[in-house]
Amino acid sequence: MQLANNRGPKSTQSTSLFLNLTPSEWNPKFATRQPDLDYRMENKTYIETGGVDEDVVRTFMQDPDESDVCSPQADLVEAYCVGASLEALEAEEGEASELLVAYLDDREFIDGGGPGRQRPYRGRLTARDLFRELKKPRFCCGGSSPSFGNDTITTVKEEVIVRLWNLTEKAPSESQKKKGKAKGERKRKRKRKRKRFITGLDRWSIYALVTTASDYQTPGLRSAIYGHLAFENFIGVTFPPKGIAMFQLAFHLPYYVWRKSPKAHEDHRIHANGRPLRQSQNVSFLDRTSSETPSFLYEAQVSCLVSGTDESRWVAYVFVDNYFEVDGEGKETVSSYHEDSLGEDGERMDPLTYGTCPVNRPDWNPRKYFLVVFRVRLNQINCEWQQLVAKIKGSVREYAHDYSLSLSGKRSSSKEALEYDDKVRRSRDWIVQVRMLSKELSMELSKTVHACERFCLKYAVYFQDPAELPNEYRTLPAIQNIFDQLESLKMTLEYLTERCDNYIRELETQLSLENNQVGILQQKMTHDSKWLSVVMMSSLPVALTAGIFSMDQNVIPFLPASFGSFVSLIIIFGILGMVIVIHFVPSYHTRCWQLVGDLAWPKLWEKKTKVSCSSMLRFSRYWLFGNPLTPSDEENPPAEQAPS
């Protein structure tokens, strides 16, 4: 993947069947203040403008161009926010005031350098605190007054808002025009930005955002909330098709996190169906060498939106998931950022950039700031993917070593064959689990890589302006390098999936061969046991007779101790044993009647069959063992021998 320049003749072309209909350059109007923009609208919320009292979330999430019966974004977010209400959010107590989830930075910049002038820092905010802060007027228009502290910032003057000439009045004089032009120059030097960082976007945080967002902020925030909840990939730039000209720089990066813990950390954010927003699964089977602490795989996502009417007025949002981390062990929270800034040498760091940039040395250009956040957050998920892929790769390597050892050696007994068969089945079950996991992760990572490719082909052109972004020659190559690493990880997962498929095919073949071998060994054991039973049946009458004749003469006085008595007793015991076997063993019972029917004297007389000693021998084997022992016996059963 290489960053495309759509403006040049050698630009990289997308393999998609759709043409690239996006503009090929950044709109130059965004570099200057829009004169026809009424900033008083920024102090009025979208909900207030529409006069909505009920179904606040659905009204906010439903695009005006959507049908009431088909609004997938509104359906998803409304179902997620079940149980929350504006009244509960405004109440003094309740669930909305329990968790510290938000950070807000609102400041103004005037040319001349420095960190800018900001509202007083409120520290860690709950959803209710965020709602109350965002309800305050952002711009000073008419009677409204933004709450800036006198110790940190002067009040924003009304002339910050550009006013239009009243066409019904007399045209201004030249001196008035010059004065207005000079005032306009001062106006253009002022820039305002607002940053909002939220961990674990829950229903109360969503209510705080949708009930305070202005009409200008609504389209971008609507897409940002839905994209974060829907676990979708996107990296790009969009421009609302209606209304005033605006830019929306956004990315949604789903990923997976591998962590060890005694038990799984469930996401406290619950859908209307009772299931957590993000899922987790036990992957302890990857630990082949040790299983002291279970391993779990968690879904996570980081989302960002930078939206504005021009480069001097913009808002940034970042939503991150942190439910899978343990408090105090590197968990990204607004409290951790706040506590790190309390020391003597402590400096407040920007949580949107993962704490890599100081708050008081911000980037005022929205495109430059977006690239910084994108690079840092992309590298964050890249590290998580690297850890996960390395874990799966190591497990497959250990399995390959054990697999080669398990194939060596011979199984000489049925017990060894059965043990080997069980071992092969367990090995197959393990590799099937790994294959399914690798395939799932490969598909999810492919979506991210595809989003990266689309960014390079369609949207990177908006960030390749040397005049406006002179320092981005370092940021874009760094992002490109992370793209390449993610693509390499995707190829590794695909290779592991293919390797698992090969192992599964080999194990299926091994199981088939082992089943055949076990069947042969069992047939051999059955044959040996039948011969043993014949030997026992043959020797048992002799043993019983010998035992009787070895007894004292007074015990059996009526049996003479003669050779004839000995032979007669053997014959009696032999016949008695045959009767018992024929009566209690169904298979022998059936074969015996077949033998009697085939050897019946009337049938022999009618067919004039001559029964030879060899045919009687084959008959006896068929009767005892149930099937012929030679192909000739199978082709010519004893009852169907040709007459002489």
Image (cartoon, rainbow, N blue to C red):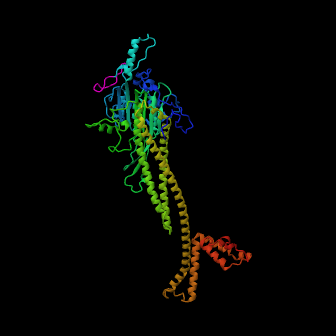
> Which of the 4 image quadrants contains residue 304?
top left
x and y percentages locating residue 642 in the rendered image:
72, 74
Rendering coords of residue 448 (x, y %)? 47, 41
Residue 167 placement (x, y as % from top left): 46, 13
Q: Residue at x 45, y 57 (%)?
A: 399
* Residue drawn at the location 48% of the way across and 56% of the way down: 429
Q: What stretch is highlighted in magenta?
A: 141-155
Q: Quadrant of residue 341?
A: top left
Q: Where is residue 354 in the image (x, y as percent from the top left)?
A: 37, 38
Image quarter hosting the C terminus: bottom right
Residue 7 part of the magenta segment: no
**Most frequent secondary structure within the magenta stretch:** loop
Q: Which of 107 and 279 is in front in this view?
A: 107
Residue 144 shows up from this direction: yes
Residue 603, placed above or below residue 391: below
Classify residue 446 as left or right of residue 290.
right
User: 234 or 9, which is in the foreground?
Assistant: 9
In the shown orientation, is residue 471 left or right of residue 342?
right
Tell me how many marks there are.
Answer: 0
Residue closest to the eye, 479 or 245? 479
Q: Can residue 132 be seen in this view?
A: no
Please give left or right for residue 137 compared with residue 605 in the image. Answer: left
